[in-house]
Amino acid sequence: MNDTDGARAAQRAREPAYLGISQIGELLADRRVSSVELCQSLLARYERLEPQLNAFISLSPERILSDARAAETELARGTVRGPLHGVPIAVKDSCWTKGERTTAGAMVMSDFVPDRDATVVARLRAAGAIIFGKTNLPEFAYGPVNSYHFGPTRNPWDLERFAGGSSMGSGAAVAAGVVPGAIGSDTTGSIRNPSTWAGVVGLKPTYGLVPLRGVTPLATSLDHVGPIARSAQDCALLLEAIAGYDRLDPTSVDRGVGRYVAGLERSVRSVRLGILRDLWSPLPDDLSRVLDNGLRVLGSLGVRSMDATVAAWDAAAEASHVLVRCEAAAQYRDLLKERGADFLPQVRERLEAGLATPAPDYLDAQRVGRRLRLELRELFKQVDVLALPARERTAPLMDAAGHRHDPEAGPRYAAPVNIAGLPALTIPCGFDDNGLPVGLQLVGRAWEEGTLLALAHQFQQITEWHRRHPPLPQPRTPLPISTTAAVQTT
């Protein structure tokens, strides 16, 4: 490395937009960086970029800086809660935050201020994380739709393009370097879709691993909550903080939390990868080439590949429409009756369609789900991980109001995994001919998030795609990082 390269590397290290959670945590714990200065720097970036992105619904600089000062005081006393202590993390605005409004993207909830935190938010706070604002989403996470109460979030890679499903604000905020990590929710792909189109890592955990209590529901049997970050390592750090049993949550499963960070370097040479090749057929040539190259990278890690099929896959994707609209309608029928005029027209139409759906249709959809789960259970006796595209295209164009220029292709690549309740993540694996991010999706057995994270982490150790950043104006707000750890005070 020459002097110029060294200077550029030093500048990148001082720019918080490019620091990962693990790096920030170490700098804060060693007191080489101030949590207050870090948050001030990211708040300045937010002020510069938010008018372009519209990634947040609400954000309180005063509360963020107050929390940062409290974290700084604890760290100065030698109290280190863990790798998230003092690290800013955004949360989707469907997650309840005590004393701060939670809209779930809906006008009917625009004044709702919870008296407690969602379990995931409480666990982030307990780990010392600073809640850095509430990110944008469609009404009740029922997306994608072509209108938004709080406006559309724009894709950092191209401001005229769609940012993805309902966790659009979380994906965009992470990709744009406003925060190093965020929390999203996923009912038919709403963590993985925006993560794919924003070029970051999104993890949907096993159903029951991360509690849903205090997260505004869409379809409870399909809803999942999980992390979004720029690296698999940072997703592992977030997952360790938010996973685990909640006895007050009927969807939560009493099962131990894995040591996801410690397992990132485990050997993956024995992993058997099943490639769902039939899902490659509708892909554009450039997308197919990028994904094939991603598979070759996995092969270089010693992963053994074979083709696989899931006969019930497409039927499950179709069944997801029925399951979501019926469960959402049951959840919001009273609110729809009382304040139907305040719902967005497309969401209201979907809820009304759910109320009008015959019970046999819902039972048929559940039967498809059982068939899918049985088939996957048998398939996972032959393979350890499934590989498939994260989406059928890169981020589509939209107009200024958020109307997509092409029809929605549906949940074919994501929703069956929600029905099965299995863990899945999407990882950046290259760019299409327009320079837009492409994501490869990996699906594992229930409770085997560690295998997916290890594969993704080692993939990222030998690739650079996740280190590329969107071509947004880069506000220079370098941190005064000390070259030696500060002496701890009492």
Image: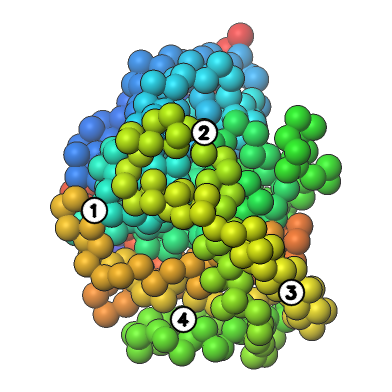
- What's the mark number on residue 454? none
Looking at the picture, does residue 57 appear above or below residue 468? Answer: above
Locate the C terminus and report the quarter of the image it occupies.
top right
Q: Mark 1 to mark 2: distance in Å?
A: 29 Å
Residue at numbered disc 3: 371
Residue at numbered disc 2: 334
Q: Are marks 4 and 1 in contact (CB under 8 Å)?
A: no
Classify mark 4: helix, strand or loop: helix
Residue at numbered disc 1: 402
- Horizontal arrangement in the rendering, residue 386 relative to residue 152 (left or right): right
Camera-nearest label, 4 or 3? 3
Q: Earlier in the sequence, mark 4 or mark 1?
A: 4
Front residue of 130/222: it is 222
Measured from the top left, where is residue 354 in percent x and y? 51, 53
Looking at the picture, does residue 116 appear above or below residue 385? Answer: above
Q: Earlier in the sequence, mark 2 or mark 4?
A: 4
Front residue of 165/239: it is 165
Q: Are marks 1 and 3 in contact (CB under 8 Å)?
A: no
Camera-nearest label, 2 or 4? 2
Which class describes the residues within 10 Å of circle 3: few (<14), some (14-19), or many (20+)?
Answer: some
What amino acid is found at the position of numbered circle 1 in the picture? Gly
Q: Mark 4 to mark 3: distance in Å?
A: 28 Å
Classify mark 3: helix, strand or loop: helix
Which class describes the residues within 10 Å of circle 2: few (<14), some (14-19), or many (20+)?
Answer: few
Measured from the top left, where is residue 208 in percent x and y? 73, 48
Q: Earlier in the sequence, mark 2 or mark 3?
A: 2
